[in-house]
């Protein structure tokens, strides 16, 4: 753990800020390259849009040897992307979503313009991308699903219509790592039709986790390919068809801490191998047609198949206690979006459109549980709890931009959302007496409805939207103020075993956000500063409770982590981003993000108090969690990215050095109601490249100081006491997520 975080971070940023203006005056002819975004479904300059958007280009992803979505977090302050397990999460402005629940993420994800419902399928396979954009704050108008905290749009690389081009890249790393990727554009009709084919094969042991019970190291394996066809026969019409295929196989043995084992040891104890497999494919079609009056019609359609399988040792100990097998399956998901937009109007530009999605999700859940009710009497229980979650989403929207004067612009958008949902999870449990030779004697069975009949079908309506006012004070300085309303629907919790009926479903969540910001061009175009401050409130906040004790039928005490509604939560903070061109061969980007999210009214929230449970089946304790943190994300986050390069005489080559400094304050454990660790890491790159022939070779080290930090922990269930009967605490804490180990590697790229 990096102890002097709060001292080092301000000094580092102040030093970089002082160095920037001094060097920036050396050559006034230099200007930053304009950054183009499509955050408002139009091609615009980043400096001109009244919202907070962070951009990570495909080149930048490759430059910093980013092989998975979690690597993007280090490049973007205030963004946390984590997980290859079911514990996937995208968080910004202090809040994210545990996708174990069948619920839309607070930060939605779009691939080539299409809403991706099963986000887990994209957490690996990061290759051959054009650009990634993070839109902070509620997205209530233009995007397929209204989101409370933000959206991420990912665009794969377009084929080159004019000539054959492409790249081949090979990276080798410590811990048996190899990442191979390629992309090639093949024009079929010059300037009209082209196809781009790209692929990825990645294998590694980068988690550095060793299961000492089974005597094995955890391995990861990803295979992916993509085919993108672009037909652009004239200025009026274009068709883009993209097919993405991703296949992952991961070992995910839970790391533990306790009984003499430190989380820094990266040891797992499970006597049952924990694995995850992901088979995902996405087909996205985009049609654009521009009419003679300069109106543009856009049709987006996607077809998605996702099957993600997890086989997990739930107790994470060497004792045979509980295993869970879950298949999260979304087959034949279709969504469609149609937009009609005016272009280049003198006073008013408008967009109208509609969205439709039909989702059928099946999640078979199998849990094997071993208990010891009395000494010498052991019981094996097999629970089958298939979950079925269907939904139909409809959205109708209008987005309008009014040019009030040469300096003032008003943006107004509104969206109507309607969602119909069906939720079922019926549990069937068989009980057997377990003998020493593993033979079984049937004892009986139990059937329980996980979602009570009155909650199995629902229909929800919501109105969301935006109102933004921006004013350009000078050519270099623009300020804006905005109000945005976000929303996400309710759903059912998917559980591995029966839980209290009140945990079965949760209600929709509304959010209202006020934001003020400025974008300021500095030093004659050689710098850009963006600052935004916001305050956001949530009503019927969907709170991810953690390891709540409850009494199951028969008297056993189980732990659950359901999503439940609390009356109100709030978040507020500041996002800043500074980009400087210090000289013609030296660039710098520094960003700081502060986000505080807390429960403003959370009386009677399910919790574990340490006190005995009330009597009766399904009993649990409650707490007043008002004032507690609403999520597990750090409040402070910062990064500094810099690159310096220099020509080597007249050889046509140049050397370069890159650095990526990333720091975050304390993470929070809702399971333990306590802070975890803060950290600061440095990634360093040194390379040589040709300025003419397209080759590039670099050596690099990520997490140079081998910093360690716990980022997510959870108390596991008690384990059976086979010797004395009953249950006992295992003495371990489950370390669900931690900082990756130091990693050295080399990358060679050839572009043609």
Image: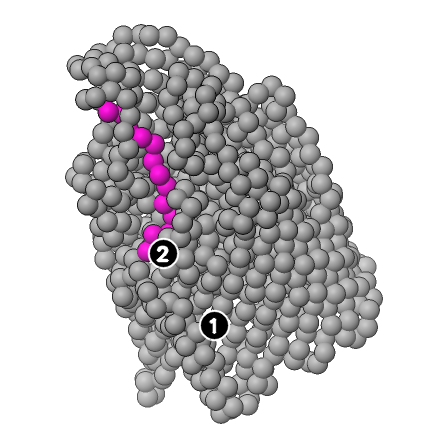
Mark 1: few/some/many CA within 10 Å (<14, 14-19, 20+): many
Percent x, y of residue 104: 56, 41
Q: Residue at x 48, y 39 (%)?
A: 545
Mark 2: few/some/many CA within 10 Å (<14, 14-19, 20+): many
Identify residue for label 2: 677
Residue 228 in sight: no
Label 2: element kind: loop
Q: Quadrant of the N terminus?
A: bottom left
Q: Residue at x 48, y 23 (%)?
A: 618
Q: Earlier in the sequence, mark 1 or mark 2?
A: 1
Left of 130 or right of it: where is 422?
right
The magenta segment is: 709-721
Left of 205 or right of it: where is 389?
right
- 19 is higher (above) or lower (below) than 553: below
Label 1: element kind: strand
Identify residue for label 1: 590
């Amino acid at each position: 753990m990096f102890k002097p975080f709060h001292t080092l971070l301000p000094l580092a940023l102040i030093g970089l800020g002082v160095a920037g203006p001094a060097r920036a005056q050396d050559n006034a002819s230099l200007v930053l390259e304009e950054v183009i975004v499509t955050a408002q479904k139009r091609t615009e300059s980043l400096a001109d849009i009244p919202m907070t958007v962070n951009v990570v280009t495909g080149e930048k992803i490759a430059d910093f040897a980013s092989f998975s979505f979690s690597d993007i977090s280090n490049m973007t302050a205030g963004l946390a992307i984590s997980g290859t397990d079911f514990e996937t999460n995208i968080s910004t402005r202090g809040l994210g979503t545990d996708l174990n629940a069948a619920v839309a993420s607070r930060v939605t994800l779009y691939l080539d313009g299409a809403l991706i419902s099963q986000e887990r399928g994209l957490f690996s396979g990061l290759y051959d991308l054009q650009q990634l954009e993070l839109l902070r704050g509620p997205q209530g108008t233009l995007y397929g699903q209204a989101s409370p905290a933000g959206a991420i749009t990912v665009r794969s690389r377009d084929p080159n219509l004019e000539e054959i081009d492409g790249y081949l890249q090979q990276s080798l790393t410590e811990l048996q790592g190899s990442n191979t990727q390629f992309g090639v554009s093949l024009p079929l009709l010059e300037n009209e039709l082209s196809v781009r084919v790209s692929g990825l094969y990645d294998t590694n042991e980068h988690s550095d986790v060793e299961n000492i019970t089974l005597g094995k190291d955890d391995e990861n394996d990803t295979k992916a390919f993509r085919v993108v066809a672009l037909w652009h026969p004239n200025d009026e019409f274009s068709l883009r068809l993209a097919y993405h295929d991703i296949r992952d196989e991961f070992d995910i043995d839970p790391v533990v801490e306790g009984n003499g084992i430190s989380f820094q040891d990266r040891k797992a104890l499970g006597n049952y191998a924990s694995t995850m497999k992901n088979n995902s494919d996405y087909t996205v079609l985009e049609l654009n047609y521009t009419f003679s009056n300069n109106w543009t019609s856009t049709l987006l359609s996607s077809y998605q198949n996702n099957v993600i399988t997890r086989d997990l040792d739930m107790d994470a100990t060497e004792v045979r206690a509980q295993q869970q097998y879950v298949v999260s399956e979304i087959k034949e998901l279709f969504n469609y979006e149609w937009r009609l937009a005016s272009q280049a109007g003198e006073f008013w530009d408008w967009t109208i459109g509609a969205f439709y999605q039909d989702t059928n999700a099946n999640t078979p859940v199998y849990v094997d549980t071993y208990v010891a009710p009395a000494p010498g009497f052991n019981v094996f229980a097999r629970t089958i709890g298939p979950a079925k979650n269907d939904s139909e989403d409809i959205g109708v929207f209008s987005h309008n931009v009014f040019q009030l004067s040469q300096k003032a612009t008003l943006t107004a958008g509104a969206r109507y959302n309607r969602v119909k949902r069906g939720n079922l999870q019926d549990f069937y449990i068989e009980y057997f007496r377990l003998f020493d030779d593993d033979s079984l004697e049937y004892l009986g069975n139990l059937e329980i409805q996980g979602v009570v009949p009155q909650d199995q079908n629902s229909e929800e309506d919501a109105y969301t939207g935006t109102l933004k006012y921006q004013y350009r004070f000078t050519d270099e300085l623009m300020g804006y103020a905005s109000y945005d309303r976000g929303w996400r629907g309710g759903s059912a919790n998917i559980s591995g075993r029966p839980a209290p009926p009140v945990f079965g479903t949760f209600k929709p969540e509304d959010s209202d956000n006020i934001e003020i910001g400025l974008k300021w061009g500095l030093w004659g175009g050689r710098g850009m500063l963006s600052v935004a401050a916001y305050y956001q409130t949530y009503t019927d906040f969907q709170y991810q409770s953690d390891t709540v004790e409850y009494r199951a039928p028969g008297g056993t005490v189980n732990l659950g982590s359901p999503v439940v509604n609390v009356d109100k939560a709030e978040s507020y903070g500041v996002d800043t981003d500074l980009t400087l061109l210090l000289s013609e061969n030296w660039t710098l980007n520094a960003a700081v993000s502060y986000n505080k999210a807390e429960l403003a009214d959370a009386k009677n929230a399910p919790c574990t108090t340490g006190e005995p449970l009330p009597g009766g089946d399904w009993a649990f304790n409650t707490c007043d969690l008002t004032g507690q943190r609403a999520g597990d994300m750090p409040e402070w986050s910062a990064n500094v990215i810099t690159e310096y390069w220099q020509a080597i005489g007249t050889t046509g080559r140049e050397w370069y050095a890159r650095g990526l400094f990333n720091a975050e304050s304390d993470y929070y454990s809702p399971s333990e109601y306590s802070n975890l660790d803060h950290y600061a890491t440095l990634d360093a790159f040194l390379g040589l490249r040709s300025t003419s022939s397209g080759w590039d070779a670099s050596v690099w080290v990520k997490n140079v100081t081998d910093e360690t930090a716990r980022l997510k922990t959870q108390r596991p269930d008690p384990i059976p006491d086979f010797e004395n009967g009953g249950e006992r605490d295992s003495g371990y804490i489950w370390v669900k997520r931690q900082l990756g180990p130091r990693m050295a590697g080399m990358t060679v790229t050839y572009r043609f």
